[in-house]
Amino acid sequence: MNRQDLVEKVAGDVGLSKKDANLALAAVLEGIQVALEKGDKVSLVGFGTFSVVLRAARKGINPKTGAKIDIAARKAPKFKAGKKLKDAVN
């Protein structure tokens, strides 16, 4: 399922136009992104939790040349599925 498929599903289930469903989806995704940029967690009960984790600096190897490289520490988004989502997939 891609974004357009999801917009069509939301529009059909809720009775919105595709344009309104697309705007609603965009607002939700932007809200999650803004919260993560601030370092906040976003918990959707039953679905899962979005958070930001700090990945430590580490050594790596360039696969093309075999040279050792330093990989800097960075922040990365993380998603942990909730119980309802896990149960639905199993």
Image (tube, rainbow, N blue to C red):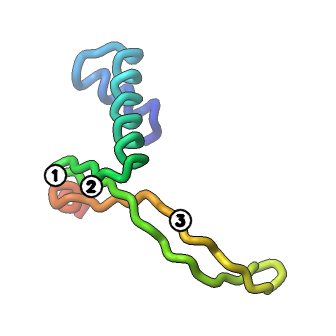
Residue projecting furthest to the front: 38
Residue at 22 percent of width and 61 percent of height? 86
Which quarter of the rendering shows the C terminus?
Answer: bottom left
In the rendered structure, which amino acid carries the disc numbered 3? Answer: Arg
In the rendered structure, which amino acid carries the disc numbered 1? Answer: Gly
Q: Which residue is mark 2?
A: 49
**Circle 2 SS class:** strand
Callout in the foreground (1, 3): 3
Tell me the CA gap for discs 2 and 3.
20 Å
Residue at 35 percent of width and 44 percent of height? 35
Q: Is residue 40 above or below residue 70?
A: above
In the rendered structure, which amino acid carries the disc numbered 2? Answer: Thr
Q: Is residue 9 above or below residue 54?
A: above
Tell me the CA gap for discs 1 and 3.
29 Å
Query: Around disc 3, counting alpha carbons within 10 Å, would you say few (fewer than 14), some (14 to 19), or many (20 or more)?
Result: few
Q: Position of residue 24 (x, y in %)?
A: 34, 24
Numbered label attached to residue 85: none
Q: Position of residue 66 (x, y in %)?
A: 79, 86
Q: Is residue 54 left or right of residue 87?
A: right
Residue at 63 percent of width and 84 percent of height? 59
Residue at 40 percent of width and 23 percent of height? 22
- Which of the two labelled residues, at mark 1 and mark 3, occupies the earlier sequence position? 1
Q: Which residue is mark 1?
A: 46
Q: Is residue 84 left or right of residue 60?
A: left
Q: Which residue is mark 3?
A: 74
Q: Is residue 33 above or below residue 28?
A: below
